[in-house]
Each structure stands twice: as C-alpha cells, then as structure tokens.
Amino acid sequence: MQAIDLRALLKTSPELARPCTQNAWIDNDTLRFDVLDDNGQELLLAVYFDKVIVKDTDCAGERKPCYGRVCVSASSDSMLARATIE
C-alpha cells in the first residue's frame, strides 16, 4: 500500500466516529493505531482512542477508552477510499 498519513485519515474518518453518540466525540489527541496486517492493497489496523462523553452543557463528563479494528484502503491519489470498522 502506498505511503499515506494514516493518522490524518483516521482523524477525519466518519467510519471511526460512527460509534460515538450525539453527545460524544473522539479525543484525537489519544488516537493511536497498530498495523495488524498489510496485504499491499489494504491495511488492517487496531485503533485505540478515548471517547469523550458530555454529561451536561457546561463540561465534558467522562472518558471511555475504545478499541476497534479498521480496514483501510487508499485510492491512487493517496486519499482514503474505504475505512470499515470490524
């Protein structure tokens, strides 16, 4: 697979944010990943991050550590073509 900025792609991936509810978001400062498999066309990543959950309008409430596996493929121009959560 071509060299792409995986961290930047994961930060902006709607697939990765999908498990977050309306009052929660991914803390991008905690986002990290490990490459589990690279078949030359797709990467299988183990992705870790904290989900910030808002308890009320004044402050962020709690943080919940999250883990998932994400399959990523890139288009010929090094843009994210597909990211699916497994």
Image (spheres, rainbow, N blue to C red):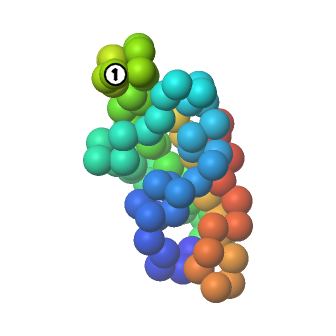
- Out of 32 and 71, give the one closest to the viewer: 32
- Out of 56 and 26, give the one closest to the viewer: 56
Q: Residue at x 41, y 21 (%)?
A: 57
Quadrant of residue 74 in the image? bottom right
> In this figure, which residue is indicated by the disc labeled 1?
58
- Out of 76 and 12, give the one closest to the viewer: 12
Is label 1 in a helix, a strand or a loop? loop
Locate the C terminus and report the quarter of the image it occupies: top right
Answer yes or no: is residue 53 visible.
yes
Q: Residue at x 58, y 54 (%)?
A: 13
- Out of 18 and 86, give the one closest to the viewer: 18
Indicate left or right for 4 with 48 as reference: right
Residue 16: image location, x then y, percent: 57, 43
Locate the N terminus and report the quarter of the image it occupies: bottom right
Residue 57 higher or lower than 38, as above or below:
above
Count of all numbered marks drawn on residues in the image: 1
Q: Residue at x 65, y 53 (%)?
A: 83
Residue 26: image location, x then y, percent: 44, 38
Indicate left or right for 28 with 86 as reference: left
Indicate left or right for 11 with 86 as reference: left
Amino acid bearing label 1: Asp
Residue 51: image location, x then y, percent: 41, 29
Residue 80 higher or lower than 23, as above or below:
below
Residue 33 higher or lower than 67, as above or below:
below
Q: Residues within 10 Å of mark 1 (few under 14, many from 20)?
A: few
- Farthest bottom residue? 77
Quadrant of residue 42 in the image? bottom right
Q: Residue at x 52, y 25 (%)?
A: 23
Residue 76: image location, x then y, percent: 68, 84
Answer yes or no: is residue 67 visible.
no
- Farthest front residue? 58
